[in-house]
Amino acid sequence: EPEVTQTPSHQVTQMGQEVILRCVPISNHLYFYWYRQILGQKVEFLVSFYNNEISEKSEIFDDQFSVERPDGSNFTLKIRSTKLEDSAMYFCASSGQQGSYGYTFGSGTRLTVV
Amino acid sequence: AQKVTQAQTEISVVEKEDVTLDCVYETRDTTYYLFWYKQPPSGELVFLIRRNSFDEQNEISGRYSWNFQKSTSSFNFTITASQVVDSAVYFCALSEAPRGTDKLIFGTGTRLQVFP
């Protein structure tokens, strides 16, 4: 069964450093998303991406965040200067055009900012 | 505004008990999709079900069943004869795009603990 792959599974970074979280969505999907889950809390939408541009972003997704689909297969989330409060699990998801089976989530990247 | 409420923060049951997880949603759209996801201790999000707003038929899949009632804006999830492996956090979610390609709005989750 096709799956969304996220790397790394766990990343530890120092406050103020830049991090790039990587995702390989399902190959024939057209819509891509990043979600965040702070430990013990609900899953929150960050950004959606379609046709090589951001289609919607939440208020969490400020200027520190950016997304890119650099080569047609990878989908990345960059945090420019990490803060302690960016520590969370970050989930990538993709969806087919018809959304027949909903969204497929990756297994997540746990980001720890120290 | 769109919102999903899961009022039960944590539920504990003994194996073989039936348990129902409640989900109430708010939306102004007539077309929307509702989802349930399971998050086991390992952390991934496991898709359980997707239901569109025009299909109010209840659904059963093995020990799992879902009761969708538009009149009360609820989409409840029942596990029959619970097992220890059912222990997880369960999230209900709402998507308002007609083709299910818009963002998901999650509830705060219900942590289910099933004791042997």
Image: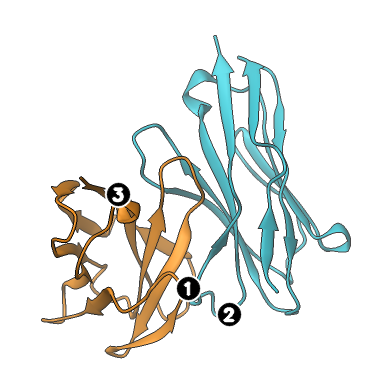
Identify the secondary structure beneath mark 1.
Answer: loop
Label 3 close to label 1 by CB (< 8 Å) = no
Q: What number is the disc on residue A99?
A: 1
What's the chain of the residue with tag 3? A
The residue drawn where x is 48% and y is 77% is B101
Q: Residue furthest right?
A: B71
Indicate the quadrant containing the N terminus of chain B: top left, top right, bottom left or bottom right: bottom right
Percent of width and height locating residue A29: 32, 75
Three-letter code, disc 2: Ala
The residue closer to the viewer here, B102 or B5, is B5
Q: CA distance from mark 3 to mark 2?
A: 24 Å
Picture quadrant where residue B41 is located: top left
The residue drawn where x is 21% and y is 57% is A5
Q: CA distance from mark 2 to mark 1?
A: 10 Å
Percent of width and height locating residue A101: 47, 64
Q: Residue furthest top?
A: B116
Q: Is residue B56 above or below residue A9?
A: below
Colour orange belongs to chain: A
Q: Which residue is mark 2?
A: B97
Three-letter code, disc 1: Gly
Q: Which residue is mark 3?
A: A107
Crowding at dot 3, Cα within 10 Å, few <14 / some 14-19 / many 20+, comes out as many
Identify the secondary structure beneath mark 3.
Answer: loop
Label 2 close to label 1 by CB (< 8 Å) = yes
What's the chain of the residue with tag 2? B
Left or right: where B80 falls relative to A53 = right
